[in-house]
Image: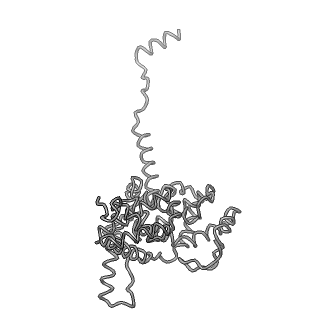
Amino acid sequence: MTASAYPYTGERDWPGDERALSRFFSGDILGFEQIVRHYSTMVFSLAARLVGPTEAEDVVQETFLRAYHGLGNFRGESSLKTWLYAIALNRARARHGTLGRLRAIFTPGRAREGDPFASLDDAADPGSTPEENVVLKERRTRLRAAIRALPEEFRAAVLLRDLEGLSYDEVAQVLSIPIGTVRSRLARGRALLREKLS
Amino acid sequence: MSARPFVSRLSDEELDLLLSRSLDGDLSPEEEHGLETILAHDPAAAHRKEELQRLVAEARALPAPAPPFALATRVNSNGSEKAGRGGSVFHRLGFYPPPGMAVGAMALLGIVAVAIAVLRPSPMRRVEGPVDVFLTEGAKS
């Protein structure tokens, strides 16, 4: 990855995966900090879409903590981006598993009430009328709810491909599935969404 | 599962797969041409494609959730702190107990330990009775 403006943060001091990793492996913690600065927004985006923006920061923290401890095992078979996405996806899933429910019990104050996704607020489109913005916001709310209601395997494919913009190859790497399965899950997920929203 | 009237072998699932791949530019030129032929002769399939196209465009236009201010700074400072302490064991499992809970747990353990020590029945003391005295005196003589 060359040093260039990154679409998520616009940062220009990103040296690229290889140089940041090499810096980290040589014992310079700044290498890892660069990785965090470069990818934290991306990880937050996926996390917020999976668990809601309120809990997303916890998922981000857990993701990078795991990444810190696991970078020694990173072989470079996938990109750092897809590797981090995979960790984030697992951390988000864990929050809804048995361990996640136990965690909610033993970390008081973190219990959320109401819709955790309610704060995913869309900014108004300056080129639209207020009425159009209301309609647009309602459609987006319905779409998000429909995506969240998809079976997990289809939801992950749709989130990664259509909302996060990953390629088929990248989705396959994140989910550790063949590309053919990516195609079929994506098709099925989109079809279910179409049925629900039409 | 309904077969397409024009190409009887194509099911709804197969059509959905072709449409989905077409939206991603994943079809070969031959497959794309074949799909266009189907859509040209099947208004229902064409309508299906339009709905899917609109849906995917809306999904792709959904704005990315904005991260909280200074997220990376917090992640970096928390990460270096937790990675160097024993508490990182819990954090690896995703548990972030508040400090009060850790102190409370230790206090509870201390109370339990004290309670066990206090309430544990003391070992039976051998009380010297007449028989023991007799035996002892007998041993002396």
Q: Is residue A55 visible?
A: no
Tell me which residue sits at (52%, 62%) in the image.
A63
Give the left or right position of residue A4, taking residue B6 as reference: right
Which quadrant would residue A50 be assigned to in this image? Answer: bottom left
Screen quadrant of the N terminus of chain B: bottom left
- Between A108 and B141, the one lying in front of the other is A108
Q: Note whether B105 is above or below B119 in the view shown.
A: below
Residue A167's x, y, as percent? 51, 67
Give the left or right position of residue B54, taking residue A38 as reference: left
Residue B97's x, y, as percent? 45, 59
Q: Is residue B127 visible?
A: yes
Picture colour scheme: one colour
Residue farthest to the right, as pictured: A26
Q: Note whether B107 is above or below A147 in the view shown.
A: above
Tell me which residue sits at (42%, 50%) in the image.
B108
Give the left or right position of residue A142, taking residue B28 as reference: left
Residue A81's x, y, as percent? 56, 66
